[in-house]
Image: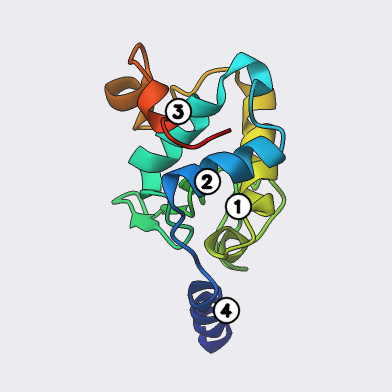
Amino acid sequence: MRGILCLLLVALATAKVFDRCDWARVLKNNGMDGYVGKGLATWVCLAKWLSNYNTSAITHHSDGSTDYGIFQFNSRYWCKEHITRRSLNFCHIQCSELLTDDVSVAIRCVKRAFRYSHDQSGWKAWHPHCWNQGLSSYLAGCSL
């Protein structure tokens, strides 16, 4: 247990809250503009409403699962919390890897998630904030 706590503290120490335009640039540089037919603004919108661009965002759920990182990947499906918890771990990662400023892990995981499903409906923020909405404000002034 002490080791897990240390890992989380180290991860949180290297976490980052992105500026909207910086996040858009990171996504663009990692091939997310047009990925599975979704424009860059879609991915920026999701991260805004899921984590407010915060790589250290954590959300605990009543079912015992936890969402991690900038895209809020759920521990029941996408990552492994620790040795005693069961997870499908579709991204083959430790959940703590999603809590650092190295967002390449989160971006690889979101790409994997969309290879399984081509819509964002699994993310709670998609329908109320990003679906069928004008998304141009998410890239406004970013000079991309």
Q: Residue at x 51, y 75 (%)?
A: 8
Q: Earlier in the sequence, mark 2 or mark 1?
A: 2
Q: CA–CA distance between discs 3 and 4?
A: 28 Å
As drawn, 103 above or below 21: below
Q: Under tag 2, what secondary structure?
A: helix
Q: CA–CA distance between discs 4 and 1?
A: 15 Å
Observer-nearest of 73 and 45:
45
Q: Earlier in the sequence, mark 1 or mark 3?
A: 1
Q: Residue at x 38, y 41 (%)?
A: 48
Q: Residue at x 38, y 49 (%)?
A: 51
Marks 3,4: beta carbons within 8 A: no
Q: CA–CA distance between discs 2 and 3?
A: 21 Å
Amino acid type of the residue that numbered disc 4 sits on in the rendered structure = Leu
Determine which residue is flagged by label 3. Answer: 122
- Name the spot of residue 143 as percent of width and height, x first: 54, 35
- Name the spot of residue 9 as percent of width and height, x first: 49, 80
Q: Under tag 1, what secondary structure?
A: loop
Q: CA–CA distance between discs 2 and 1?
A: 22 Å
As drawn, 61 above or below 4: above
Determine which residue is flagged by label 1. Answer: 79
Using the rendered image of the protein, determine whether residue 22 is visible from the camera's viewpoint: yes
Determine which residue is flagged by label 2. Answer: 23
